[in-house]
Amino acid sequence: MPEAFVEMLSGGHPNSLGRTEEVLGLVLADGSRLEQLFDCLDEPDAIVRMRAGDALNDSMQTQAAQVIAHPTGGDLRLVQPQALRK
């Protein structure tokens, strides 16, 4: 079983990215793990939430635009980087 993102994103110095780049690579390689990354935004650990947000932001920048079905909202939303919203 793959290592959980919560474990990968926790610990270390609060100002470091820790294993954020590794998590980003896993999400980009396997889009089915995106929901697991979204779930990290609800974690009680602020470091995990910050790093998950950073990884999500970077994934949107890398993939330009994609349709995401967020598990808690149940709706489809088009997500684009800020630069493309003009």
Image (tube, grey):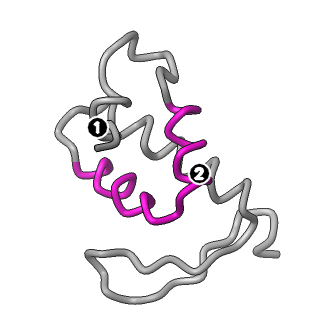
Spot the residue most to the front: 1
Residue 25: where, in percent of width, then height? Answer: 60, 42
Q: Amino acid at mark 2?
A: Asn
Would you name the residue on which mark 2 appears?
A: 57
Tell me if residue 29 is in the magenta stretch.
yes
Q: Is residue 16 left or right of residue 73?
A: right
Q: Is residue 23 above or below residue 59?
A: above
Quadrant in which the C terminus is drawn: bottom right
Q: Is residue 35 above or below residue 86?
A: above
Classify mark 1: helix, strand or loop: helix
Residue 4: where, in percent of width, then height? Answer: 29, 40
Nearest to the observer: residue 10 or residue 49: 10
- Which residue lies at the image location 50% right of the left edge and 16% below the top edge? 16
Residue 79: where, in percent of width, then height? Answer: 60, 74
Would you name the residue on which mark 1 appears?
A: 6
Q: Is residue 85 left or right of residue 34?
A: right
Q: Is residue 54 left or right of residue 41?
A: right
